[in-house]
C-alpha cells in the first residue's frame, strides 16, 4: 500500500510538473495597451515616426469630434499620347475643383499603350507608368483603351467597372449620396532634408465589415508639367509641351490592393491605425505630392471610403 | 476542389516504423499468417432538388447533390489503422460549401495495450465534459473538428489515466492555423482503492489543460499567440446518488466571436442525480462567460471549435418542437435544468395494468449582465444571471402509458419561451423579439400481427408571436407502418396554417420508405424540408428550405 501511495504521488508530481510547464509556455496574458505601438513598417525607435505619432489624433478615440462624410475616388486612366484624354481630364479636374471639391479625390493612372514612353526624340520620353498601375489596368480593363474611369471601383455592368467621362459627374454624385461606411484620417510628417515621409492612417468603420477589408495607401503627384497630346488642337499644336498633368499616380505604399486591416471581420465602430515610412523619390516635387488612403472590400473591389492629404 | 490529401508514403512508413519499434513480440506475430481483419461502414445521402417558390426552396445547377463516406479500419492484435474517404459531390444544401470535393481527410494508426495507447494521424477525444476540449464528428451539423497529430495515453497505475496530445484541427479540406497542445489526467479513486468500490463509492478527480498557438497577424491589436484553457473536475457517486462538476478557465483570447474582448473566460457546470427504481431526478446548472475556444480567430459559425459546452436544455425530438431549439451562447449564459422521471407502478389504480411513466422537464437560460466601462476591449460581468434578460425557457410534461400488449400512447405538452433575437441573431442584448410557444403531441404505437407496427403522431403548435418574421401556428400529422425487421413506410404533413402571411401557408408533405437487409439500409423519400435551425447538443446550423427526392444508404461490414 505504501509503495502504491508513493507511486501515485510520483505520478501526480510528474503530471503537475508537465502541466505547469505547459501553462507557463502556453499562456500569453496581454495587459493594456492592447493596440500595437503603430510604428508599422517603420524602424523601431524611428524619431520621425515617434514624433508623428504625437501629431496624430488620440489613438484611444481618433475620430472624437470629427464629422465623417462620404468621399469618392475617381481613377482616371490616361496616357500622354492619348489625344482624347485631355478632354476627359478637364472634366475630372472640374469635378475635383468645382463640382464636388474635396469630396471627390482624383487619381490619374497612366497605363496602356498610349502611356508608353517614346524611346527616341525628346517628346513623351517620361514614363509615368507604375507596377501597381499595370496591375489595376490588367484587372479592370478588358481592352487597351483610354480614357476611362473607375468610380469607387463600383461595377458599371456585371464584371465591368469602367465609366466613360460623360458619366463621371452623375455616378460620382450618386456615390456621394450614399451614407459613409468608414472614416479615414491621414497624418503626414515629412522631413524635407532627408526626403523621408511618415504617414499615419486612422480608420474607423461605421458599418460591420467583412474579413476582406483592405487599406490601400497611394502616392500621387499634382501639377506635373510635361508633354501631352490633345486631338482637340490641330497639326503640330496637338503636342503640348507644357501640359499640366493632374494627380499622377506614383505608386502605392502598401501594394496595389493594400493590406488587410485585420485578420478577421471588421466590427462596427472599430478603429485601426497603420503607420508607413517612405522615402520620397527625388524626382517628385514634395510640395505637390499627396497621400490617398482608401478602404475597400477586397472581394468586390468596391471602395468604402477614401481620404487625401498633402505630404507637406 | 480537391482537398489537400496527405501523402500516404510517409504515413505507411510511420506505421511500419512504429510496429518495428513497439515490441519484438509484435514482430514475431507479424511472421504468423494472421493478417488481421478489416471492418468498415458506408453512408451516402443524396437529394434531387426541385424549385419550390412557395417555401423559397432553391434548386441547384447540378440538380442532384450528395454527401458520401466510407470508413475502413484494419485491426490486428493491438494495432489498428484506418481511413475515411469523403465525397461531397456537391455538398447537400445546408452544408458548408467549403466541403466541396473528395478525398481522405481522416486517417490514423493506433497501438493500444492495457497501459499504453499511441495514436498518430486523426483522432477524436474529449477532456471531462468537453468544456476544455472536445474533438468530435456530428454529420447532422456538418461538424468534424478532429485533430491531426499525435496522442499518447498512459495508465501506469490502476485507476490513473493520463493523456497528452498535440495537433491541428480539421478545417474542411485543410487544417487549422492554430496548433493545439493539451494534457488531461483522471484519477478513479474507486479503482485505485478497491475498498471504496466495495462500499459503493465511485469517486474521480480530473484536471485538464489545452493551449492553442496562433500567430498574431493583426496589424492593429496585440494578440496573445499562446492561449490556454485549464480546469478541474470531480465526480462523487454512492449508490443512488451522483454529483459531478467541472470548472474551466480560459485566459484572454480576443476573437471575432467575443468582439475581440481581452476578458478571460470561465465556465462552471454541476450535475446532481438520484436514481432509484421507478424514479430518476437530474438537476443541472451551468454558467459560462466568454468561453468560445476556437483554433482560429475568424470562424463565426460552427467550425474549428476546440471545446464543447454541455447543454442544459432538453433536446426535443418531435418535429414541431424542433422548430424552436436553443443554441448555447458561449459568450455568456446562466442556465439550469431539472429532469424528473417517475414511473407509476403497474397494477395500480393510476398506473394501470402495465404502468405509466411521467417525465417532467424544466430548463431556463438567462444572459449575464455585462458592462463595458473604459474600453471596448474589457467588460465587467456579474456572477449572477441577468434576470431581465431571459434567453430560453422550456416547461414540458410527458405521460406515457401502455394500455395493452398492443397499444401504447404518449402525450406531451411543451411550453417554450424563445428569445429569437439572442438565439437566431446572436444579439445578446436583444430582449424584445421573443416568442411564447405551446405544443401538444399525441403519439400512439399499435402492434399488429406478424411483426407489423403502426405508429402515429398528432402535433399542434401555437405561438403568441407578434413578430413579422415568425411563422405562427402549425399542425402536423404522421403515420408510420413498419414490418420488422425489413420494411418501413411513413407519411407526414406539417401545415403552417397560422402564418401571418396568407401566401405562406404551405403544407410540408413527406413520404418516406426504407428497406433493411442485414447490416444495410436503403431509404427513399420525397417531400418538403422547412427552413430553420437544426441543433444537436446546443450546437446549431441553419438549414435552408428544400423540396426534392432523397435517397440514403448505410452499410456496415
Image (cartoon, coloured by chain):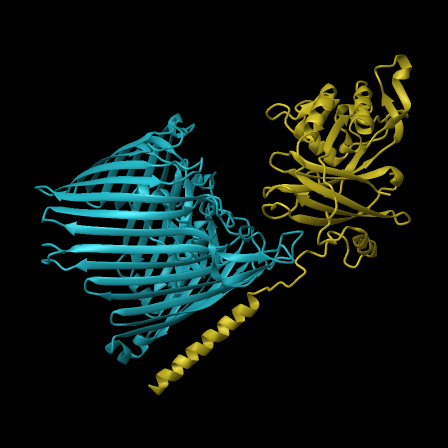
Disc count in the image?
0
x and y percentages locating residue A295 in the rendered image: 68, 40
Judge from the rendering whether residue B202 lies leftward or rightward of residue B349; answer left or right.
right
Query: Which one is nearer the viewer's eye here, A83 or B128?
Result: B128
Judge from the rendering whether residue A74 lies leftward or rightward of residue B10; answer left or right.
right
Q: Residue at 24% x, 36% y: name it.
A: B477
Judge from the rendering whether residue B188 lies leftward or rightward of residue B367; answer left or right.
left
Q: Establish if B254 lies above or below B474.
A: below
Q: Is residue B121 visible?
A: no
Q: Colour of chain B?
A: cyan
x and y percentages locating residue B452 in the rendered image: 12, 41
Q: Establish if A265 lies above or below B184.
A: above
Residue at the extreme bottom of the image, as rendered: A2
x and y percentages locating residue B406 in the rendered image: 10, 46
Q: Is residue B281 visible?
A: yes
Q: Residue at 42% x, 56% y: name it.
A: B308
Residue B160 image-quadrant placement: bottom left
Residue B79 image-quadrant placement: bottom left
Q: Residue at 56% x, 67% y: name it.
A: A25
Residue at the extreme left of the image, as rendered: B449
Q: Colour of chain A?
A: yellow
Judge from the rendering whether residue B302 lies leftward or rightward of residue B401; answer left or right.
right
x and y percentages locating residue B178 in the rendered image: 53, 55
Q: Establish if B99 lies above or below A171.
A: below
Amino acid at each position: 500500500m505504501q509503495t502504491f501511495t508513493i507511486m501515485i504521488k510520483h505520478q501526480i508530481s510528474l503530471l503537475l510538473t508537465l502541466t505547469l510547464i505547459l501553462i507557463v509556455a502556453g499562456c500569453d496574458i496581454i495587459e493594456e495597451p492592447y493596440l500595437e505601438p503603430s510604428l508599422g513598417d517603420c524602424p523601431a525607435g524611428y524619431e520621425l515616426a515617434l514624433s508623428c505619432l504625437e501629431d496624430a489624433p488620440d489613438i484611444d478615440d481618433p475620430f472624437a469630434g470629427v464629422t465623417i462624410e462620404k468621399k469618392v475616388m475617381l481613377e482616371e486612366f490616361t496616357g500622354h499620347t492619348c489625344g482624347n484624354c485631355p478632354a476627359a481630364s478637364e472634366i475630372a479636374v472640374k469635378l475635383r475643383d468645382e463640382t464636388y471639391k474635396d469630396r471627390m479625390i482624383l487619381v490619374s493612372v497612366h497605363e496602356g499603350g498610349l502611356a508608353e514612353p517614346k524611346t527616341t526624340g525628346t517628346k513623351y520620353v517620361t514614363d509615368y507608368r507604375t507596377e501597381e498601375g499595370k496591375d489595376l489596368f490588367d484587372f479592370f480593363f478588358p481592352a487597351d483603351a483610354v480614357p476611362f474611369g473607375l468610380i469607387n471601383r463600383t461595377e458599371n455592368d456585371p464584371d465591368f467597372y469602367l465609366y466613360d467621362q460623360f458619366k463621371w459627374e452623375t455616378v460620382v454624385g450618386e456615390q456621394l449620396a450614399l451614407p459613409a461606411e468608414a472614416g479615414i484620417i491621414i497624418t503626414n510628417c515629412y522631413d524635407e532634408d532627408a526626403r523621408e515621409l511618415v504617414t499615419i492612417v486612422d480608420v474607423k468603420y461605421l458599418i460591420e465589415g467583412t474579413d476582406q477589408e483592405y487599406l490601400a495607401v497611394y502616392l500621387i503627384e499634382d501639377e506635373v508639367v510635361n508633354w501631352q497630346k490633345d486631338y482637340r488642337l490641330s497639326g503640330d499644336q496637338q503636342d503640348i509641351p507644357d501640359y499640366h498633368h493632374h494627380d499622377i499616380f506614383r505608386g502605392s505604399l502598401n501594394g496595389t490592393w493594400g493590406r488587410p486591416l485585420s485578420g478577421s471581420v471588421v466590427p462596427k465602430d472599430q478603429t485601426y491605425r497603420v503607420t508607413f515610412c517612405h522615402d520620397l523619390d527625388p524626382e517628385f516635387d514634395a510640395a505637390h505630392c499627396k497621400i490617398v488612403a482608401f478602404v475597400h472590400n477586397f472581394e468586390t473591389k468596391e471602395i468604402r471610403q477614401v481620404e487625401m492629404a498633402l505630404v507637406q | 476542389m480537391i482537398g489537400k490529401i496527405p501523402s500516404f508514403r510517409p504515413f505507411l512508413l510511420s506505421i511500419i516504423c512504429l510496429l518495428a519499434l513497439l515490441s519484438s513480440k509484435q514482430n514475431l506475430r507479424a511472421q504468423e499468417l494472421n493478417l488481421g481483419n478489416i471492418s468498415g461502414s458506408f453512408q451516402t445521402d443524396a437529394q434531387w432538388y426541385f424549385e419550390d417558390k412557395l417555401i423559397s426552396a432553391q434548386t441547384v445547377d447540378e440538380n442532384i447533390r450528395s454527401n458520401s463516406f466510407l470508413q475502413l479500419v484494419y485491426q490486428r492484435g493491438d494495432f489498428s489503422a484506418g481511413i475515411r474517404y469523403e465525397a461531397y459531390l456537391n455538398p447537400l444544401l445546408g452544408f458548408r460549401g467549403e466541403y466541396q470535393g473528395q478525398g481522405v481527410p481522416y486517417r490514423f494508426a493506433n497501438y493500444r495495450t492495457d497501459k499504453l495507447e499511441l495514436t498518430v494521424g486523426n483522432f477524436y477525444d474529449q477532456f471531462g465534459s468537453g468544456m476544455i476540449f472536445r474533438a468530435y464528428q456530428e454529420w447532422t451539423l456538418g461538424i468534424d473538428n478532429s485533430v491531426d497529430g499525435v496522442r499518447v495515453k498512459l495508465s501506469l497505475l490502476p485507476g490513473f489515466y493520463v493523456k497528452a496530445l498535440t495537433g491541428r484541427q480539421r478545417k474542411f479540406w485543410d487544417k487549422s492555423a492554430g496548433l493545439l497542445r493539451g494534457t488531461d489526467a483522471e484519477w478513479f479513486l474507486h479503482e485505485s482503492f478497491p475498498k471504496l468500490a466495495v462500499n459503493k463509492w465511485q469517486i474521480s478527480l480530473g484536471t485538464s489543460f489545452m493551449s492553442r498557438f496562433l500567430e498574431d497577424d493583426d496589424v492593429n491589436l496585440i494578440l496573445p499567440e499562446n492561449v490556454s484553457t485549464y480546469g478541474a473536475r470531480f465526480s462523487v457517486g454512492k449508490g443512488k446518488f451522483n454529483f459531478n462538476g467541472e470548472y474551466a478557465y480560459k485566459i484572454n483570447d480576443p476573437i471575432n466571436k467575443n468582439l475581440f474582448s481581452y476578458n478571460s473566460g470561465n465556465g462552471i457546470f454541476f450535475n446532481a442525480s438520484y436514481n432509484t427504481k421507478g424514479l430518476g431526478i437530474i438537476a443541472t446548472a451551468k454558467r459560462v462567460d466568454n468561453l468560445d475556444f476556437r483554433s482560429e480567430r475568424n470562424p463565426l459559425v460552427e467550425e474549428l471549435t476546440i471545446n464543447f459546452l454541455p447543454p442544459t436544455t432538453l433536446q426535443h425530438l418531435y418535429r414541431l418542437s424542433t422548430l424552436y431549439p436553443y443554441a448555447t451562447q458561449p459568450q455568456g449564459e446562466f442556465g439550469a435544468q431539472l429532469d424528473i422521471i417517475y414511473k407509476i407502478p403497474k397494477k395500480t389504480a393510476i398506473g394501470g395494468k402495465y404502468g405509466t411513466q411521467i417525465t417532467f422537464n424544466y430548463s431556463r437560460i438567462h444572459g449575464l449582465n455585462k458592462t463595458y466601462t473604459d474600453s471596448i476591449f474589457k467588460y465587467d460581468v456579474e456572477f449572477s444571471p441577468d434576470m431581465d434578460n431571459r434567453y430560453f425557457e422550456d416547461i414540458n410534461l410527458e405521460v406515457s402509458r401502455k394500455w395493452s400488449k398492443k397499444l401504447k400512447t404518449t402525450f406531451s405538452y411543451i411550453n417554450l419561451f424563445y428569445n429569437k433575437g439572442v438565439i437566431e441573431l446572436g444579439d445578446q442584448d436583444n430582449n424584445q423579439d421573443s416568442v411564447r410557444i405551446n405544443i401538444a403531441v399525441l403519439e400512439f404505437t399499435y402492434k399488429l400481427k406478424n411483426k407489423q407496427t403502426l405508429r402515429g403522431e398528432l402535433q399542434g403548435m401555437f405561438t403568441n408571436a407578434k413578430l413579422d418574421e415568425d411563422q405562427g401556428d402549425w399542425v402536423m400529422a404522421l403515420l408510420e407502418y413498419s414490418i420488422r425487421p425489413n420494411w418501413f413506410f411513413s407519411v407526414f404533413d406539417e401545415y403552417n396554417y397560422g402564418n401571418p402571411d396568407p401566401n405562406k401557408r404551405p403544407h410540408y408533405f413527406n413520404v418516406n420508405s426504407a428497406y433493411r437487409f442485414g447490416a444495410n439500409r436503403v431509404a427513399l423519400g420525397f417531400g418538403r424540408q422547412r427552413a430553420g435551425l437544426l441543433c444537436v447538443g446546443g450546437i446549431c446550423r441553419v438549414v435552408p428550405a428544400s423540396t426534392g427526392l432523397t435517397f440514403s444508404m448505410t452499410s456496415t461490414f
